[in-house]
Image (cartoon, rainbow, N blue to C red):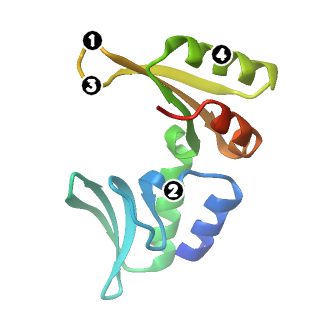
Amino acid sequence: MLLKTIRELEQWMKENCFNFDSYSINGNFIYEGFGIDNSGGLFIWYYTERGERDNLKYFVTESEATIYAYNQIKADKWAKAHCIGFTQNKMKSIELGNKLNEMNIAFFQDEIPYNGKHLFSYRTFVFGCDVRKVIGLKQEYPSE
């Protein structure tokens, strides 16, 4: 696929259900992640975290920046990940996984320390446009 503009990249991401939480493409706000900025005609691929921004790569043309960003986003497994469950209740996480299995939807679950190194939260992610199929589950298993 050959995308030439940032707007085309944004549209491609929307059509393929990529997650904009960690990518600022065409100006959307993010707390942390990667983005493209246009500064005086120079295109910048950057990373931001905790209010600190690092400019990683510079491009003379929008097309070069778009192609680079497309390849980076396409290679990032988390770019298509959508968190649909976040709980400290392990049984709720297991139930959600069972329902996703019944629906034949691919998912990934993990546990992370949260509010202390001995307290865990359980996260459930679905990928791509499957997020559209699980809207009801997000309401049934709201994040705590």
Q: Residues within 10 Å of mark 4 (few under 14, many from 20)?
A: few
**Mark pair 1, 3: CA separation:** 8 Å
Q: Residue at x 22, y 60 (%)?
A: 53
Query: Which residue is under mark 4?
Result: 95
**Mark pair 2, 3: CA separation:** 26 Å
Q: In the image, which disc is placed on residue 20?
A: 2
Residue lying furthest right: 103
Query: Which residue is under mark 1?
Result: 118
Relative to 144, is 92 on the left or the right?
right
Residue 25, compared with residue 107, is above or below; it is: below
Q: Residues within 10 Å of mark 3 (few under 14, many from 20)?
A: few
Residue type beneath disc 4: Glu
Relative to 119, is 28 on the left or the right?
right
Query: Which residue is under mark 3?
Result: 115
- What element does badge 2 sit on? helix
Of residue 122 and residue 14, the one placed in the foreground of this image is 122
Image location of residue 17, percent across then percent down:
66, 52
- What element does badge 3 sit on? loop
